[in-house]
Amino acid sequence: MADKIVENIRKEAKRILEEKIVDIVIGFEKGTLPYTASPVFIENPDDVDKLIWNRYCHNNLAVYLRNFPDKKIGIIVKGCDSRSIVALMAEKQLTRENIYIIGVPCEGMLDKNKLLEEFGDNPPIEVKEEFLYPSCQYCEHKNPVIYDFLTGEPVQEKEEEPYPDVVEFEKKTLDERWKYFQEEASKCIRCYACRQACPMCYCEECFVDTNSPKWLDPGIDLPDLQVWHIIRAYHQAGRCVDCGACERACPMDIKILWLTRKLNKDVRDLFEFEIGIDPEKVPPLGTFSLYDKEEFLI
Amino acid sequence: MKKIDKKRLFERLNNLIKDYVVYAPKGKDFGKIEDTSEIKRESINVRLSPKQVFLPQEEALFTFKQGDIKVPENNEKYILFGIRPCDAKAIALLDKNFDTKDFPDPYYIDRRKNSILIAEACIEPESTCFCTAFGSGPFESKDADALIIDRGDYYLIDGNEKALSLFDGLLEDDGGEKILELKKKAEDSIKSPVVEGIDKKLSSMIDDPIWDEVSRKCITCGACTYLCPTCYCFDIQDVGKDDKYMRERVWDSCMFTVYTLEASGHNPRKEKEKRMRQRVMHKFNYYPFLYDEYGCVGCGRCIKYCPVNVDIRKIITKIMEV
Ligand code: SF4
Ligand code: SF4
Ligand code: SF4
Ligand code: SF4
Ligand code: SF4
């Protein structure tokens, strides 16, 4: 099936470039390391054979959409990436007419580190669910929610509770949760790869970068690291599409997805809102209602 | 060359921890150890490089309180055990930048002058290694105080007096063991891009369209430069913590947008192609211009940990093809 998808991607990319529907197509090319695909930008219709599709195309390509303000863009998206596009539209960051979406029903991306550990440089023939990235294991939108062209048959969606990990985590004591958070945050080197990999972290000036006012000291003192992690996550509450691009980008293998997932679950439970489905619906963080639930206020 | 029993070497190292701050591979990263049982390698080279010893991510240059200014003193002695030859070379490159005649950096020099570098040869280099491109290699000994070669129960060791004296009484005759084949095998397994002449070539490429092309996938994080053993950029900020106030030096990276942001609001390197150009130019043009050596040692960290697989070897090859 993957071969058919690749063929369809190339054909459609070629067509939209030749017919000048778009100026550029953002997709994936073969990477230079085992279990790796790498983002690629195609402008010449003759180059479409560079485009590939496999279980390693994990980057969220929606992050590049803001790099080409004057261009019509073709983009190849999985379910999560398509939700980022919807989320960006809801926040008026994108004009639908300027993008042409090639959607790929996704079977989940495979965790490079787990594969390397288990199989070294020799890729396995069969892969089990446990080799999927956490975000893919819990994903309930494998099929693109918005597209102009779909490259294959839709895949079966999951029906179970989408936040089993958060439900489990909530059962831990406050001390246990705090300790886990401290341990993870303490590994941070503040490279901001997590922020840069996220389509929703599009602020012209991030709070960590301002020096007047200075919200946060530089360096790697634990309290500073914790503030960075808490505020990054908080700014994503109900805006984050659970794609996991941030966690995969982290060179220090820090677990950060659970934080945003917890906040997303809260937003779902408190405001009955899910991001990246309806481009007309603004996330709760970006709006105000007199009827907001305020049970946390005493 | 000499031979040293591993068990005895580690016992000695444990004793030395009393007098030295000892750093070694600790799983994925390089870090301070309290006991040699913590020494563990999870990959050929460590992720966080040894530069952290001499240029920590965060350090106080001085503290101040009501006119009372204190400069922290550092009289520690350091042993860096089991660094790789590429990282030893990276430290030699950092020396060129921090231990200069005109602007010697006392903080760096204080730590560096009291340090002993013990490098370990890479018998099986990684697929991302390309140290041979820069005149170095997996068995290169010249930038460290000693080089050890793992032979199972024992190490072969060669080095200067400073390093070998640490192991007084433990060194045995090597029995004429030959390592040439081992060395050749390791070197041959490395596929390095050709770099000869890249510095001259780059001098005329400041406006080349290649920078847009090679930077497109880059998301401009700091992963490559923070993990790079030769990147040394820092920022200086005043910080107040609890009731302590200090002027701090913290890592910074030319890949960040704010790195060159000026007080006026102007940013000469707002576009990411200019930032990628800076990173490449610094390593392959400015460094050779200033110090007659490339500023990259081919450790492969930036390749391995880049979230979008920007591969510096590919960039080098593209430049050479222009
Ligand atoms: S915060 Fe992480 S999981 Fe959420 S949208 Fe951003 S990259 Fe994806
Ligand atoms: S990517 Fe990882 S190390 Fe870098 S800032 Fe984010 S959490 Fe910290
Ligand atoms: S690690 Fe990769 S994405 Fe990040 S700045 Fe370096 S080259 Fe760019
Ligand atoms: S540029 Fe990359 S390969 Fe070269 S020394 Fe730095 S991290 Fe290593
Ligand atoms: S490449 Fe960039 S971060 Fe590294 S030393 Fe040069 S200017 Fe600094």
Image: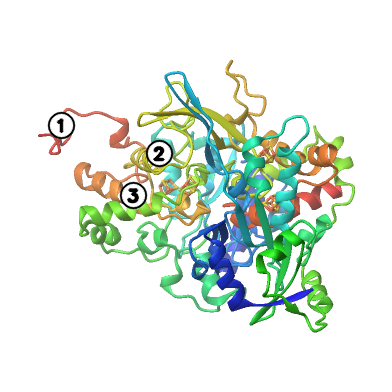
Q: Is residue A111 above or below residue B216?
A: below
Quadrant of the rendered structure where residue B15 is? bottom right
The type of residue carrying mark 3 is Leu
Instruction: Give residue B116's position: percent from left, percent from top.
Output: 67, 56
Q: Which numbered circle lies on residue A136?
A: none
Quadrant of the rendered structure where residue A87 is? top left
Which residue is under mark 2? A224
**Disc 2 element:** helix
Q: Is residue A128 above or below residue A31?
A: below
Q: Residue at x 85, y 49 (%)?
A: B320
Q: Are marks 2 and 3 on the same chain?
A: yes
Which residue is under mark 3? A259
Of all residues, the one furthest to the top in this rendering is B264
Distance (Cα) linking label 1 and label 3: 26 Å
Point out the frontmost of discs 1 and 3: 3
Instruction: Give residue B199's position: percent from left, percent from top.
Output: 85, 43
Q: Is residue A276 above or below residue A162?
A: above
By what rule are the colours in the image chosen? rainbow
Q: Chain of mark 3?
A: A
Q: Residue at x 76, y 75 (%)?
A: B2
The type of residue carrying mark 2 is Asp
Q: Chain of mark 2?
A: A
Q: Chain of mark 1?
A: A
Q: Are marks 1 and 3 on the same chain?
A: yes
**Disc 3 element:** helix
Does label 1 or label 3 sit earlier along the sequence? 3
Instruction: Give residue A196's position: percent from left, percent from top.
Output: 52, 42
Q: Looking at the image, which is closer to me, A267 or A196?
A: A196
